[in-house]
Image (spheres, rainbow, N blue to C red):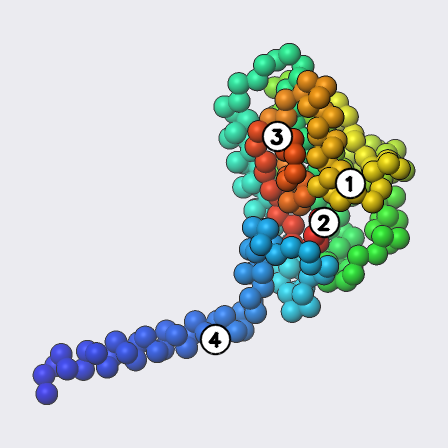
């Protein structure tokens, strides 16, 4: 038998070994949780209430071990590159919209105690945390914020927080380093019961009707970035801990 006769069998063996190795890795490493996070960020996964139990550990490691902040930083770098080439009008109507929670301020200290989104959302507990006014800054967003201010862009926070939290939110933002803005837009009584998409679309629309040009819009939820009057460019910040429609 010639030497080359064994080649097909060797190649078959290597192929089978490779399949076995990959199958093992897929079964034991992440249990599909990295794929689940990818589908959350691409907005394929919608309407979910809690992080799947099998993925709580995976999400915790993602949030705590540097990858989350790296992904966040890269998203902001994309927005900085966009801002660099913007031809602003300079008439006081150039505007940018920021979300608040998980975009400019981090609630990770709260979610660290609640299984990184693996527990059902409890508004009483979360509002108590917000009321403390101690949410830490997300540094990459503050970097973008300061660049925009230096360019003369008007900053608006459009947040899903209720009007009752205006004072504590203002103090928290200032303590985190956000010292100057043109408006904080919060949910009032008439906004209760609307989805985030409906509410934020309406509030952005009010800015546009006042003559503002929304050059950019940053948020951690797709509901921050969809609907109407979304702006010239949107930038999605990663957040696998919760979903808001």
The CA distance from mark 1 to mark 3 is: 18 Å
Mark toward the start of the polypeptide (1 vs 2): 1
The CA distance from mark 4 to mark 2 is: 34 Å
The residue to which callout 1 is attached is 160
The residue to which callout 4 is attached is 24
Mark toward the start of the polypeptide (2 vs 3): 3
Please name whichever residue, 66 or 37, is drawn nearer the observer in this view of the structure.
37
Is 198 situated above or below 27?
Answer: above
Residues at marks 1 and 2 touching, judged by CB atoms closer than 8 Å? yes
The residue to which callout 3 is attached is 231
The residue to which callout 2 is attached is 244
Residues at marks 4 and 2 touching, judged by CB atoms closer than 8 Å? no
Residue 49 in view of the camera: yes
Residues at marks 4 and 1 touching, judged by CB atoms closer than 8 Å? no
Residues at marks 1 and 3 touching, judged by CB atoms closer than 8 Å? no
Quarter of the picture containing the N terminus is bottom left
């Amino acid at each position: 038998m010639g030497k080359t006769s064994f080649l097909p069998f060797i190649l078959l063996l290597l192929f089978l070994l490779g399949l076995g190795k990959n199958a093992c890795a897929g079964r034991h490493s992440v249990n599909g949780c990295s794929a689940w996070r990818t589908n959350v960020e691409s907005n394929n996964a919608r309407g979910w209430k809690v992080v799947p139990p099998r993925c709580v550990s995976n999400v915790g490691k993602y949030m705590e071990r540097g990858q989350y902040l790296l992904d966040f930083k890269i998203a902001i770098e994309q927005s900085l590159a966009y801002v660099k080439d913007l031809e602003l009008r300079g008439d006081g109507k150039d505007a940018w919209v920021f979300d608040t929670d998980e975009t400019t301020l981090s609630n990770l200290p709260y979610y660290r105690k609640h299984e990184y989104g693996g527990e059902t959302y409890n508004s009483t507990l979360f509002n108590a945390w917000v009321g403390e006014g101690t949410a830490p800054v997300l540094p990459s967003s503050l970097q973008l914020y300061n660049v925009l201010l230096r360019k003369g862009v008007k900053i608006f926070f459009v947040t899903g927080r209720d009007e009752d939290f205006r004072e504590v939110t203002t103090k928290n933002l200032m303590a985190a380093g956000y010292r100057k803005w043109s408006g904080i837009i919060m949910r009032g009584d008439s906004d209760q019961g609307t989805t985030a998409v409906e509410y934020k679309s309406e509030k952005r629309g009010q800015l546009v009707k006042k003559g503002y040009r929304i050059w950019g819009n940053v948020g951690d939820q797709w509901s921050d970035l969809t609907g109407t009057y979304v702006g010239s460019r949107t930038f999605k910040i990663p957040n696998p801990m919760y979903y808001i429609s």
